[in-house]
Image (cartoon, rainbow, N blue to C red):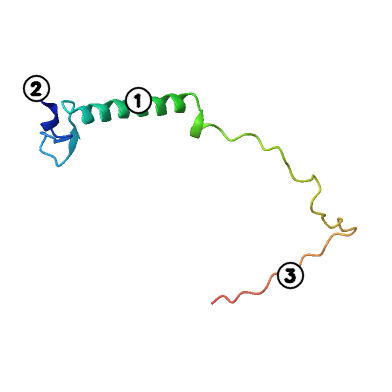
Amino acid sequence: MNYDREPVFKRSKWGTQRYYYNPRNPIGLTLIIISLLFAGTMMLLMANRAGPFAADPAPTWSPPRHEYSRPPPASTPTPWLAPLPTSRP
């Protein structure tokens, strides 16, 4: 049987405009196997949090503890300003 005449993609018979890999074509079968291996590898990497799914490493540098100086506290309490008058009808 000559498999070269089979198309790589076949139209879905579910009434949609989608296509699927044809396992009767050697290229279609190869694409199916590659897709399954890729999906399985990605799922293993996600489950183990490895590769592109690895957590970011802890930062090794941190800013100095007192980078910004604050003004010293006031010796006397600051007076509150009177609220601005509002116009009410």
Which one is closest to the eye, mark 3 or mark 2? 2
Q: Earlier in the sequence, mark 1 or mark 3?
A: 1
Circles 3 and 2, Cβ within 8 Å, touching? The answer is no
Q: Position of residue 77 (x, y in %)?
A: 85, 59
Look at mark 1 in the image and give the residue it sits on: 37
Q: Is residue 32 above or below residue 19?
A: above
Look at mark 3 in the image and give the residue it sits on: 82
Q: Nearer the viewer, residue 77 or 72?
A: 72
Q: Amino acid at mark 3?
A: Ala
Q: Position of residue 40 (x, y in %)?
A: 37, 24
Q: Amino acid at mark 1?
A: Leu
User: Which of the 4 image quadrants contains residue 74?
Assistant: bottom right
Q: Is residue 76 above or below residue 52?
A: below
Name the element at disc 2: loop
Q: Position of residue 73 (x, y in %)?
A: 86, 55
Name the element at disc 3: loop
Circles 2 and 1, Cβ within 8 Å, touching? The answer is no
Q: Earlier in the sequence, mark 3 or mark 2?
A: 2
User: Which of the 4 image quadrants contains residue 60?
Assistant: top right
Q: Residues within 10 Å of mark 1 (few under 14, many from 20)?
A: few
The Cα atoms of the two marked residues, 1 and 3, are separated by 73 Å
